[in-house]
Image (tube, rainbow, N blue to C red):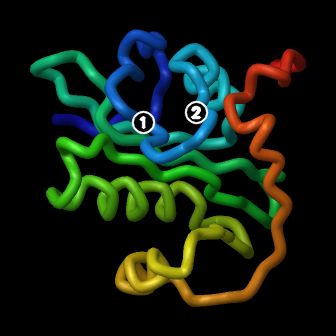
């Protein structure tokens, strides 16, 4: 397995296999690749034996003061091996020059992120689940 911050050579075929588990309207692998391409930074975990992305984390940012980490995913078959923790550490290293790095997660995941060095905070959100697949977003750069 290797970790990579480049999307060079990554195809949507490499994003198959169970990302977005539990989502009612998950993005397709094609949309998944577009969201990674539109990110400020990405870190991928790649199983080189099967040429498959098995985990990823992305960040969106103004590049000056703030970044938000919207997604951290590890395929179910690869969980429990420290891959998610490594993805977070690598991403935090890429963002350390910024003033604020925010992440919104479900309450049951807060302890996980605290162990990695993040602090609890409160926040607000809107979720438009009808747009969860990303299919309605045609304005990709």
Camera-side residue of 139 and 39:
139
Residue at label 1?
A: 19
Which sits in the foreground, 97 or 81? 81
At 59% from the left edge and 60% from the top edge, which residue is drawn?
95
Q: Residue 87: which disc? A: none
**Separation of disc 2 and disc 1 at Cα?**
8 Å
Q: Nearer the viewer, residue 43 or 80?
A: 80
Q: Earlier in the sequence, mark 2 or mark 1?
A: 1
Task: Identify residue for label 2.
Answer: 26
SS state under label 1: loop
Q: Position of residue 78 (x, y in %)?
A: 19, 45
Q: Quadrant of the C terminus?
A: top right
Q: Residue at x 66, y 30 (%)?
A: 35
CB under 8 Å between callouts 2 and 1? yes
Task: From the top left corner, tell me how far across and down residue 14 is, in percent.
Answer: 36, 16
Locate the N terminus and report the quarter of the image it occupies.
Answer: top left
Q: Is residue 105 left or right of residue 45?
A: right
């Amino acid at each position: 397995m290797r970790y990579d911050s480049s999307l060079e050579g990554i195809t949507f075929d490499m994003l198959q296999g169970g990302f977005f588990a539990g989502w009612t309207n998950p993005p397709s692998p094609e949309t998944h690749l577009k969201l990674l391409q539109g990110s400020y930074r990405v870190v991928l975990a790649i199983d080189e034996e099967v040429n498959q992305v098995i985990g990823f984390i992305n960040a969106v940012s103004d590049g000056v003061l703030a970044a938000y980490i919207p997604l951290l995913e590890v395929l179910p078959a690869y969980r429990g091996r420290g891959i998610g923790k490594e993805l977070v550490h690598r991403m935090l290293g890429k963002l350390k020059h910024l003033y604020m790095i925010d992440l919104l997660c479900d309450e049951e995941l807060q302890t996980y992120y605290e162990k990695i060095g993040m602090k609890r905070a409160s926040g607000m959100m809107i979720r438009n689940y009808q747009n969860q697949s990303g299919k309605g977003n045609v304005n990709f750069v």
